[in-house]
Image (spheres, grey):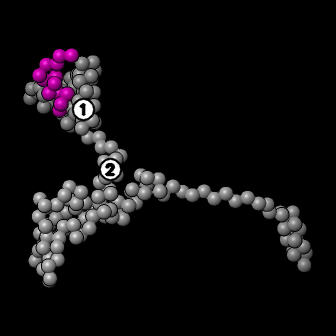
């Protein structure tokens, strides 16, 4: 499946933008073309079997690169749950010494949401542990609804009889 350089560029731009007309404009010389012509030519390219196959290949490649496994997600969430402020700093007397980010292991740095300079020092925020625990609970099925089975009988006839007797009084 051999594509021209412009067709290959069109496929890549289409993956990048998600818009066939924009991909066509970037890949081909369109300065003297009307918008309708660009739209038509872009649609024609998407009807080409070689183009569609190449776009599919590029999408598959992106999917494989971006996929994370459940296990990876569990590890990241567990890192957030297990992180402690003492992982990133030491207290020496009345002095607080923050460790260099380069000294911290990956499981600690992955639990840090942000670091910013503030008046008088820095502010380090961790990701929300409660949210991580909630997400882990859902992923692991710990929060499945419990079902309750209730069995028995209600003597409706007697109840109705006593109800009607009360009305007569």
Q: Residues within 10 Å of mark 1 (few under 14, many from 20)?
A: few
Q: Position of residue 6 (x, y in %)?
A: 12, 23
Q: Residues within 10 Å of mark 2 (few under 14, many from 20)?
A: some
Quadrant that contains the C terminus: bottom right
Q: What span is in magenta?
A: 1-13
Q: Is residue 39 left or right of residue 120?
A: right
User: Observer-nearest residue: 2 or 31?
Assistant: 2
Q: Is residue 95 above or below residue 104?
A: below
- Residue at 13%, 70% (x, y): give it: 98
Say which label, 2 or 1, has the lower sequence index: 1
Q: Nearer the viewer, mark 2 or mark 1?
A: 2
Q: How many marks?
A: 2
- Residue at 17%, 27% (x, y): give it: 10
Q: Which mark is residue 61?
A: 1
User: Observer-nearest residue: 90 or 81?
Assistant: 90
Q: Position of residue 9 (x, y in %)?
A: 14, 27
- Residue at 16%, 24% (x, y): give it: 8
On whether residue 11 falls in the magenta region, the answer is yes
Residue of label 2:
73
Outermost residue toward the front in this view: 92
Q: Which mark is residue 109?
A: none
Q: Is residue 46 left or right of residue 102?
A: right
Q: Quadrant of residue 67?
A: top left
Q: Quadrant of residue 100?
A: bottom left
Outermost residue toward the bottom in this view: 94
Q: Position of residue 38 (x, y in %)?
A: 18, 27
Whether residue 49 is visible: yes
Quadrant that contains the N terminus: top left
The answer for how far apart the CA atoms under marks 2 and 1 are is 21 Å
């Amino acid at each position: 499946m051999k594509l021209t350089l412009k067709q290959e560029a069109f496929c890549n731009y289409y993956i990048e933008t998600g818009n066939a007309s924009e991909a066509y404009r970037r890949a081909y010389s369109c300065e003297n073309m009307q918008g309708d012509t660009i739209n038509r030519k872009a649609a024609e390219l998407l009807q080409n079997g070689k183009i569609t196959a190449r776009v599919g290949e590029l999408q598959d490649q992106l999917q494989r690169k971006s996929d994370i496994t459940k296990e990876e997600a569990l590890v990241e969430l567990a890192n957030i749950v297990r992180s402690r402020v003492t992982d990133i700093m030491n207290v020496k007397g009345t002095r607080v010494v923050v460790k260099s980010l380069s000294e911290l292991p990956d499981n600690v740095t992955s639990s840090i949401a942000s670091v910013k300079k503030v008046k008088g020092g820095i502010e380090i925020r961790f990701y929300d542990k409660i949210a991580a625990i909630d997400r882990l609970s859902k992923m692991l099925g710990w929060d499945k609804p419990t079902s309750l089975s209730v069995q028995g009988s209600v003597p409706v006839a007697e109840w109705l009889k006593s109800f009607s007797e009360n009305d007569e009084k």
